[in-house]
Image (cartoon, rainbow, N blue to C red):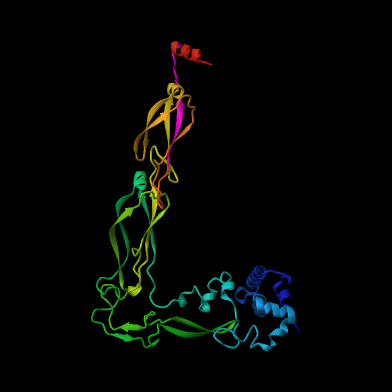
Amino acid sequence: MSKDYYKDLGVDKNASADEIKAAFRKKAHEHHPDKGGNEAKFKEINEAYQVLGNTEKRKQYDQFGSSFQNGQAGGAYGQGFGGFNGGVNINMDDLGDIFGGFGDIFGFGGSSSAQQGPERGRDLEMSLSIDFLDAVHGTETEISFPHLKKCSFCHGSGHAPDAKITTCATCKGSGRISRVQRTILGAVQTQVVCPDCHGEGKKASANCNNCHGQGRVKEVETIKVKIPAGINQGESIRLAGYGDAGEKGTSGGDLFLRVRINAHQHFKREGDDIHTQAEINIVQASLGDTIDVDTVHGNFKLKIPEATQGQTIFRLKGKGVIHLHGRGQGDHFVRVKVLIPKNLNKKQKDLLNELNL
């Protein structure tokens, strides 16, 4: 009797590949045995997806029905994992976020069991606070931080200097061993890191007394760091190799310094531009004048033209922050505020009345 795979997944015959995948994931959640579902139904769903999720198989199914598999070895079943009969051929990329660590059981990508040998050192991150003008112009500072460093006694090997090195008898030097697990979906063969040599494929007769075989020790290190001109709030500086040292001499991680910039009393930064405010009186606004303006590059003269209105913005080209990832630099923008005099005497008021147009 022909099987209706579209009905099993609850999709229309014109469903797209994405719709089929989404339907499979939903029903796999619902019927997975570990979640209290029906094992037989779960296998039906998987069989349907193995066909409809494959472009060529779907075409054959649409043309000949489920009987198209009769000439194939095992159809959606039989091939299983590593050729074990009774296994189920599941695409773990499709199941990935459904069962969480379920993929680890089968030794698929992303699982720690798929890694071989000592691991690379961890990346580290720390915050670094700097002054506003140091971020604009760049500076050099000193930082101290704890991290795992390569052991200086054994140079990261973890072995005592006079230790005898032999091939691991458990894995025969491969660093990995095979295991067969019985699961609800059949027998599964996996490759895991050798528990005796931890993936090295060799063993030492004695460990280093300083690091106790780890190849690394925790220390506080002090280094000088160059802060590039133009760095902005929240950006990071990568210091290659200054993260934790790797296990047994493998490469170390990196240290990332996330920059925090202290606010400035007068300057406000937007991108690579600087914004400030300048105050002028009504005479300067009416008749024009030249005023001094403080920028991140020093004091500059700004010409105020006649009849300048309050909140007018003037631009000092190229007086902003140096572009961190390119040439040139930003601008400095000055917003003028016209001060209205208070507590005028009678004579001053009369003069203003005379000017009232």
Image position, residue 108 (x, y; %): 52, 77
Q: Splitting the image into 4 quarters, where does residue 46 fall?
A: bottom right
Does 166 appear above or below 154?
Answer: below
Residue 56 horizontal side relative to residue 167, left or right: right
Q: Which quadrant is the N terminus positioned in?
A: bottom right
Q: What residue is rendered at 42% in x and 26% in y? A: 280
Which residue in the rendered view is the most extreme toward the right?
A: 1
Residue 154 seen from this side: yes
Does 26 appear above or below 77?
Answer: above
Magenta part of the chain? 331-346
Q: Nearer the viewer, residue 257 or 287?
A: 287
Residue 3 seen from this side: no
Q: Nearer the viewer, residue 62 or 194?
A: 62
Residue 336 horizontal side relative to residue 60, left or right: left
Is residue 333 covered in magenta?
yes
Image position, residue 299 (x, y; %): 34, 35
Is residue 33 covered in magenta?
no
Q: Splitting the image into 4 quarters, where does residue 102 fall?
A: bottom right
Does 124 appear above or below 264?
Answer: below
Tally of numbered discs: 0
Does 156 appear above or below 325?
Answer: below
Which residue in the rendered view is the most extreme toward the left?
A: 162
Image position, residue 190 (x, y; %): 50, 82
Q: What residue is rendered at 47% in x and 11% in y? A: 350
Image position, residue 168 (x, y; %): 36, 86
Q: What residue is rendered at 31% in x and 55% in y? A: 225
Q: Nearer the viewer, residue 127 or 315?
A: 315
Residue 102 horizontal side relative to residue 326, left or right: right
